[in-house]
Image (tube, helix red, strand yellow):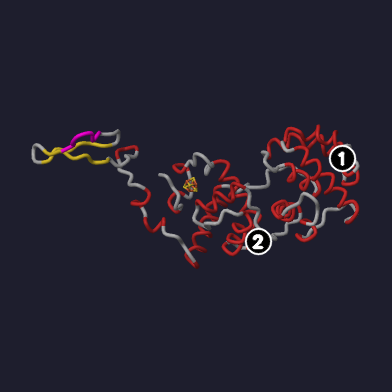
Amino acid sequence: MVTGSARIRSGEEVRRLNGKQRMVIRKSATKKGGRTAPSPAAKSPAKRKKKKGAELKAHAAEILARLKKEYPDAHCELDFATPLQLLIATILSAQCTDKRVNIVTPELFQNFPDAESLSTAAPERLEELIKSTGFFRNKTKSLLGMSAALAERHGGNVPSTMEELVDLPGVGRKTANVVLGNAFGINEGVVVDTHVGRLAVRLGLTNETDPVKVEQALMPLFPREDWALLSHLLIFHGRRVCIARAPKCGDCVLEDICPSSRV
Ligand code: SF4
């Protein structure tokens, strides 16, 4: 019997036992068409089990294959025509959308077409041009320092090694990976941004949250020739379906193999 202060909440039903006794039973969620959808844990313990070794590699291969099929045109969404333009756009993309960066860069590239001209730009002018991308004072310093270093050490050209790139002011491993993978076609590592980091955990590929550790976890799971593409695929999926706050699991091509599915 439901006694004292016990209350019946939405999603619960009361069943009568022996004519007098009653008990409260929590109803399971019901899918369209009346089919009962068990809770994720009850639905597939095997799917939720942490995968390791060969099983994890097979899981990664399946994810890659499905995302390639889903997004055959996945690509870097920053607009650029040269390695320098991509380097500039990537620096500007920190804490900013690619869409906003693409609005700002045409005028910037037109005013400062090479490293030499950029390195001698008036900071106030640069700040004005890139203001809408946020953190514009720091980004201005990075652009000035980076372009001066290019002009002094590399004849104005963007180098094509990780070592030389991360030695430039304002250039970290993520930016270097973007430039190497997309401007030079060199798969040196995996770009781990907020989308890649989130999806890697949701998909059960790693438990790490530090971007460098996530990258180290992803690299052995995927063929090297796919590293740059992998980032684009995860970013495409993260922006369109596996959204941070409200993932659209019901529309996801990975739903049946994803340990974090909410369906
Ligand atoms: S099933 Fe949900 S959580 Fe898993 S990848 Fe798809 S959208 Fe993301």
Residue 50, image x, y percentages: 45, 60
Residue sitting nearer the eye, 227 or 68 = 227
* Within-10-Å neighbours for mark 2: few <14, some 14–19, many 20+: few
Kindly identify the residue that appears in the image at 38 percent across and 49 percent down. Answer: 40
Our reading of the magenta stretch's main secondary structure is: loop
Q: Quadrant of the C terminus?
A: top left
* Within-10-Å neighbours for mark 1: few <14, some 14–19, many 20+: some
Residue sitting nearer the eye, 128 or 247 = 128
Kindly identify the residue that appears in the image at 78 percent across and 56 percent down. Answer: 165
Amino acid type assigned to the residue bearing label 2 in the image = Glu
Residue sitting nearer the eye, 168 or 177 = 168
Amino acid type assigned to the residue bearing label 1 in the image = Phe
SS at circle 1: loop
Residue 134 belongs to magenta span: no
Residue 140, image x, y percentages: 80, 40
Mark 2 vs ligand 1: CB below 8 Å: no
Residue sitting nearer the eye, 252 or 73 = 252
Mark 1 vs ligand 1: CB below 8 Å: no
SS at circle 2: helix
Which residue carries the number 2 mark? 225
Give how far apart the Cα atoms at labels 2 and 1 are: 33 Å
Looking at the rendering, the stretch of residues picked out in magenta corresponds to 1-7
Report the disc number at residue 112: 1
Kindly identify the residue that appears in the image at 87 percent across and 47 percent down. Answer: 115
Report the disc number at residue 263: none
94 left or right, relative to 59: right
